Structure formats: structure tokens, C-alpha cells
Amino acid sequence: MSSLDADTVLYSILALVIIENALEIYISLRQVKVYRNALKVPSELTSHMSEETFHKARKYGLDQENFGIFKALLMDVLLLCLELYLGLIALIWKTSEEIVNRLQWDASNEILVSCVFVLISNLLSTFKSLPFKIYKIFVLEELHGFNKQTAGFFAWDQVKSFLVTQVVMLPITAAIIFIVQRGGDNFFIWLWVFTGVISLVLLTIYPIFIAPLFDKYTPLEEGPLRKSIEDLAASLKFPLTKLYVVEGSKRSSHSNAYFYGLWNSKRIVLFDTLLLNKGKADDSELTDDEKGKGCTNEEVLAVLGHELGHWKLGHVTKNIIIMEVHLLLMFLVFGYLFKYAPFYEALGFQPGTRPILVGLLIVFTYVMAPYNAIINFAMTLLSRRFEYQADEFAHSLGFEDQLGRALIKLNLDNLGFPVYDWLYSTWNHSHPTLLQRLARLKELGETKKQQ
């Protein structure tokens, strides 16, 4: 294959990277302009949000967006383009072969070389991202009062995260290479089946075995809140088996709630920061800033009514089906294109060298980039629709007022800024904005009164 073909592929990839990031940065700059110019609390929130909190949220959002733009320019444009142009991926592959040789293993065994390649790549990626993580947590989040991590906690967290990632990724990598090598012409079908099974397995084991390595999970204590949650779950025939509180306050003061589990074994997890005063009857252990934050029991129930709405309306199942169809299409394209030599030569590989893992990276990340952008946008729109439906479900349970109050409290506690550029919000937000959700709840309430 001529060098011209490889050069064309390389410059096409570089152009794609630059165009994609330029679009993202342009959209982010639109929101930066909003942060700088929106100086008044929206009329819908004047009775809930003080001028001081509004400007704190504005400054927090502005700092986050500027940081994101800087990181995108440095990491996703300058550094990535330089790595692609200089052939870093091919260099890492060659280094992996040399390491396998030094260990007196079989360097012709692509599975072994691929596993070493993944290990080195993940190590480099970890070190590249580390300064940005440190800045985000210990400067940006610290400045705005959200960081609760110590340096020691952060360091041990990174070590655990790296080790767990390798334990999970290396066997999966080996299996993928094996399936492509032995699966015949229709290997993409076996690859799709394998990834589908692995996804379901990880969805099952992550919350049970992996998540507790990073955060402390304790059963929600007996009391009115637990009884109300169990009654709500029973009324919806939600197969609740466990109810946990995760000590997220050791990591951050941001709050959340979610459920997980397959089939007839579901678990609900509440962040301690979601609960009023972290769920403590005695607030003497809390700082002045922590006191009074969180949702009342009724508001927590409203939040869970929304989350259970996702389950009741089949949103999780629909997302899994969409993901599986998407993966099948991706693997089909990979199976058709991964032997195309210029893809590899463009990244610095010698003619005839076509590592399966690198082909997967090229096809999934670069060849399919326009398709991925469209699918991601479509999934964002679908997610927003699902959120409206889940809000409507919570409303049907009688949680209109409680859900509205909870949304406002969570927004205030997390310093969420209520004003967004329409294009930024449409492109990025998987949830409708606070004002959009409040307006929808009000509309539902008025419709109910008229009936």
C-alpha cells in the first residue's frame, strides 16, 4: 500500500479530531458567554435561590467550563494529534513486543503482546490525566467547597482504580483477540455475544464487589425513611432486596441516588449527601456548611419515585437493547474494515503489521466518529425524554411538590447554575434543565386540576 494512502488516512484522522473538538469547544464557549452575562436569578427561583448562591453557582460553572476547554485543547487536540502524527501507538506496540521478548515469552503471540500493550497504554493514560484530576479535585472543587478528599485518600483511590481496571481489562482483551482469531468470517457475531454477556456480568458484579473497594456502603438504618421506601417499592412491585447508604461525603459533597441489579434482585443506593444532615439525627458532627443540606424524607421519596419510574417504564431495558444493536453494528463495520492496511500504516506500523486491538481502536474511535457523534446526540435526546417521563411518573405518585422541592434543593446544594445556552444544553445535557423540569411539573399539575 502506498505511503500516500497512509498519509491520506492520517491527515483525515487528524482533521476529524480537530473538527470534532472545535465543535465541542465552540459549544462550550457559548455557555461561557452565558455564565458571564447571566447576572440575575431567574424569576422562577427568586424565592428559593439567593443572589449569593446564584453567583457562586455562576462562578463554579464558569471555572468548570474554562477548565474543560483548556483540557480539551491540550489533551484532545494538541497532545492527541502529536501522538497520532508521531506514531506513538506503533511505538507502544513495538515496546510491548520487546518486553514480551525480554520476558522470554512468545512475541508472535498477539494475545500476550496485546495485554502488555493495554497495560502500557493505561499506565501512560493514567499519568497524562493525573495532573488534570489533581487540579480538578484539589483546586477547582476545593475552591468551591465540594472536595472532601485528602491527598492520601486520592492517591490510594488512583492506585486501586488502576489495579482494578487492569484486572478487568486484561482478560477481556485476551478474549477479544482470541475470538477475532478463531471466530471465522462471522467472528463479529461471537464478539457481540461476548461483549453483551460481559456487560451484563459487569453490571451485576460492579456494585457488589468493585464499588465497595472505593466507598463504604451500609444498610439504611431502620426508621420512617426505610419503611417509606420499602412501602413505595412494594406498591410498584419493585423487587427491592437491599437498601444502602454510600458514604459519598468522604469523596465529595455532591449528591445522588440510583438503583442497580438484574431481574428480581434490585438494590437502591442513596448518597449520604442526599439525606438531610447526611441522615444523622445529631448534627453536632457536621460542619456549619453541611448543616441543613440534603432532602427531607418526603423529598428523598420523590427522588426515588423518579428513579423507580425509569424501571417501571422500561427505560433501563430499552437502553440495553439500543446499546446491543449499536454494538452489533460497530462490530459488523469492524469486521469489514479492520484488515485495511493504510489504517495501521497511518499510525506508524510497518506494512504487514495489523494488530487486532489497534484495528478495533481505529474503527471504533476514528472511522466511526461521525456515526458516534450522531448516536450520542440521539441518545442524549432520548435520555431527556426518559427524564421527563420519569418526572411524570413521580408526579402520578403524588410527588409533584416534593419532587420540585427536591430538584431545587439538589441544584442549590450542588451549585447547579439554572441558566444555559440552548445549543449547549441540547448537545450536552442528558437531563432537562432545572427550569424545564419545574415548568413541566407545573404544567402537569395544572392539567391534573383541569381534569
Image (tube, rainbow, N blue to C red):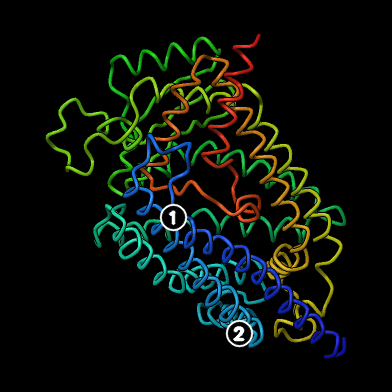
- Position above or below: 314 against 1: above
The picture places residue 106, in percent across and down from the top left corner, at 62, 74
Q: Could you say whether the residue bearing mark 2 is in a helix, strand or loop? A: helix
Task: Identify residue for label 1.
Answer: 39
Q: Residue at x 55, y 57 (%)?
A: 169
Name the mark on residue 82: 2
- Identity, as a three-letter code, of the amino acid under mark 1: Leu
Nearer to me, 198 or 238:
238
- Position above or below: 434 against 81: above
Between label 1 and label 2, give the one nearer the viewer: 1
Number of marks drawn: 2
Q: Is residue 216 left or right of residue 119?
A: left
Q: Which residue occupies the extreme left position in the image?
A: 284
Name the mark on residue 433: none
The picture places residue 180, in percent across and down from the top left corner, at 76, 59
Label 2 CA crowd tier, 10 Å (few <14, some 14–19, many 20+): some
Q: Residue at x 35, y 34 (%)?
A: 274
Quadrant location of the C terminus in the rendered image: top right
Q: Residue at x 42, y 14 (%)?
A: 230
Q: Is residue 431 left or right of residue 62?
A: right
Quadrant location of the N terminus in the rendered image: bottom right
- What is the distance, in whole Å, between disc 1 and disc 2 at their CAs? 40 Å
Nearer to me, 101 or 300:
300
1 or 2: tag closer to the N-terminus: 1
The picture places residue 44, in percent across and down from the top left corner, at 48, 36
The picture places residue 441, in percent across and down from the top left corner, at 56, 26
- Position above or below: 421 against 107: above
Q: Residue at x 63, y 68 (%)?
A: 26
Q: Could you say whether the residue bearing mark 1 is in a helix, strand or loop? A: loop
Nearer to me, 428 or 104:
428
Asked if the residues shown at circle 1 and circle 2 are in contact, with their CB atoms under 8 angstroms apart, the answer is no
- Position above or below: 95 against 199: below
